[in-house]
Image (tube, coloured by chain):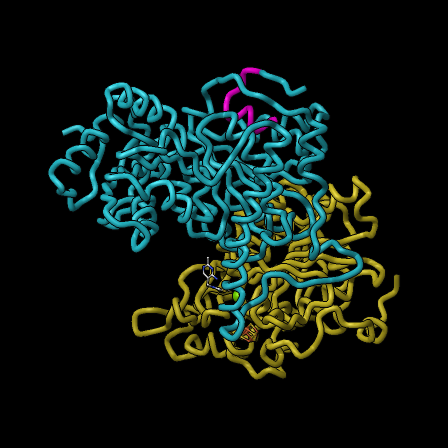
Chain colours: A cyan, B yellow
Amino acid sequence: MSIRERFSGNEAVSIAIKQINPDVMAAFPITPSTEIPQYVSSYVANGEIDTEFVAVESEHSSMSACIGAQAAGARSMTATSSCGLALMWEMLYVAASLRLPITMPVVNRALSGPININNDHSDSMGARDTGWIQMYAENAQEAYDNMIQSVRIGEHKDVLLPVMTCQDGFITSHAVENINILETEKVKAFVGEYKAEKYLLNPEENISMGPYDISAYYMEHKYQQAVSMENAKRVIAEVASEFETLSGRKYDFIEEYKMDDADFAIVIIGSSAGTAKDAVDELRNEGIKAGLVKIRIFRPFPAEEIVKALKNVKVVGIMDKAEGYSNNGGPLGAEVKAALYGNVTGVKAVNFVYGLGGRDVKIESIKTVFEQLLEVDKTGKVPAHYQYLGLRK
Amino acid sequence: MAYNFKEQMSKPERLSGGHRLCAGCGAGIAVRGVLRALKPEDKAVICSATGCLEVSTCLYPYSAWNDSFIHNAFENAGATISGSEAAYRSLKKQGKVNEDYKFIAFGGDGGTYDIGFQSLSGAMERGHDMTYVCYDNGAYMNTGIQRSSGTPMYADTTTSTVGKNSPGKMQQGKNLTEIIAAHNVAYVAQTTFMSNFKDLQMKAEKALYTPGASFLNIMAPCPRGWRYETEDIMEVCKMAVETCTWPMYEVENGKWTLNHMPKNKRPVEDYLKLQGRFKHLFKKGNEHLINDIQVGVDKNWQALLKKCEVA
Ligand SMILES: Cc1ncc(C[n+]2csc(CCOP(=O)(O)OP(=O)(O)O)c2C)c(N)n1
Ligand code: SF4
Ligand SMILES: [Mg+2]
């Protein structure tokens, strides 16, 4: 029997780590993910797990140590947020290109400067092109479930890529919810033993990893990495289906909410989807055919699924909790529009930047988004630029 | 165990020839010297920081390393090998690995004194069972001879350029060996290539087989960057030691030992004049610059003698 208990997002993810019992965890504190290494340290101290916990002197070293550990043949994890993820930037690419399935909870927080500890997605969005698989959770339950699935996805022989499982700082990481925890034995059986094919501590075969790669080979290696990201789509679906059998909880690349007959939709990531669903319900009561698409998997990008979900809407609002400074909208806006281009006709799109540095997102604020979408439909005029939501004037 | 030069030199190489280091490069000599100290039956995981050593010994699809090897980046050899060592502890206690492994990181002076300093300090403080070896060639050679914090005073490099208004690098080299000794790790030593390589061999052996974190700083000359004739490397090393520019010492569990006392301490000129990077010091009117170097060397030497309790 699974256990229903009250946990915060950080606790939920830490429990998943405890149940997986990784070989190595190297981590460094940063708000709001600090609790995760704290929990893991206490599990080790209390003999609940036998993970080698490496209390490194920086996030740069936590990712570097995870690379050294996973390359050596150990299942390795870390956790971070914001500046910590930014400090890892160079190493994120190395982890992915060495094809090391490290898993990392990211508790999303704004990037400096100015320094701000509250939630937005600028940290993980900045890491979107590093070659990591990215999963996003709406709530603590999803954070827990994604963490367990991430190990299977990354370690699959057709994938072999690192995975970050993101949840919103404070909103999800610190709020306590009732969630279902699986039995540890079932989690262990689900993730299985880690058995690397090529690893440094294989006594049968000495290998070299991380060579200098010349132009005659580099591009092929990058292509292989891209193929693995493509394979990840198949594997993510397979793992989700197995996980559904185990838990009864169904996961897809995106979640469609009231999209069957929607004229107006928003595309959104993370905890704000919960608030936005309430807004959609209220609008439906008012007779407006509103709907919502929540992105669960951002890398690999679910372009086909998004096109399928949006092909019949009149106007879509794409919600970015990160600035891209491209002067052309946020990262989600750019990618959703690129996915729609040439695949749908007549769908108008407006991109919104919202919730930066923890700016509150209320049902009312989401409703103002839909108001603007209706206005676009009425006038036929799409605002040329992207919009800031809830900006103080 | 008695040291037999011939025996040592006929051991199978753990770093194969055919790599692309320049002829006479000190980095390769340092690595081979350290790896000779491994017991043949012991396995090793070796990490190299980015630098001349790494780009010359591991070019896809080739590798000169006969042991398992990983290159991660420039600034993180310490953290990387500490991760591999943590993995080993985990897999060993689970019974998934039974063989004995040693964990060795190599970094140049840039990767060790400068950009990789934090990562090294962290790994040393945590006390992983590992050996970090700095092959110190006194500049960023791989990117074209830029100064590092280990570059000696008044050396000409491409970012401490000698010119009308500049006598070369303005600062003394940072004393990294002493800084690591201050981490109170199990074993710290400084060495270079001397006569029959016994000193290097003994220190590498101690570093590798003393449980816990250990650090070796090996002066490893670079003929290109230092501008001396390749075949003069042993003379250059000898003069570094005889002038007390690069003293040979070790720190074992807090005890400092001087391993070589020059019979006649030579003036620093005898070391400087062998190298093109110091050529400008010998121009008329620059005598005071040489004196500055001498004063710095003497001060460090006196302090070291005190620590080693040599009267
Ligand atoms: C983060 C980062 N900054 C800069 C570089 C460029 N770079 C590569 S090797 C190197 C210098 C290496 O110097 P050192 O560690 O002394 O080794 P050497 O080449 O002298 O053997 C530099 C600056 C890099 N690879 N990574
Ligand atoms: S430039 Fe110097 S350090 Fe680099 S390979 Fe050549 S001799 Fe060695
Ligand atoms: Mg150097």
Q: Is residue B107 magenta?
A: no
| Residue at 74%, 62% in the rendered image | A206
Does the image show residue B188?
Answer: no
Count of labels shown? 0
B133 lies left or right of A105:
right
Rendered-image quadrant of the N terminus of chain A: top right
> In which of the image's four quarters is ligand 2 placed?
bottom right
Residue at (23% x, 47% y) in the render: A346
Locate residue A113, reporting x and y percent: 31, 39
> Relative to residue B60, is residue A371 depicted above or below?
above
- Write down the region rendered in magenta: A5-15
Hey, which residue is sitting farthest right in the picture? B1
Residue B111 % position (x, y): 53, 58
Q: Which of A219 and B86 is in front in this view?
A: A219
Q: Can residue B80 be seen in this view?
A: yes
Q: Which of A315 and A74 is in front in this view?
A: A315
Quadrant where the C terminus of chain A sits is top left
* Magenta-colored stretch includes residue A11: yes
Residue projecting furthest to the front: A261
Residue B123's place in the image compared with B58, above or below, is above
Q: Which image quadrant is residue B104 in?
A: bottom right
Camera-nearest residue between A93 and A281: A281
B186 relative position to A313: left or right: right
Q: Main secondary structure of the magenta part?
A: helix
Residue B297 position, x and y percent, is 54, 61
Q: In this view, does A280 lie above or below B58?
A: above
Residue at coordinates 35% horizontally, 35% vertically from top-left?
Answer: A268
Q: Is residue A72 left or right of residue A8?
A: right
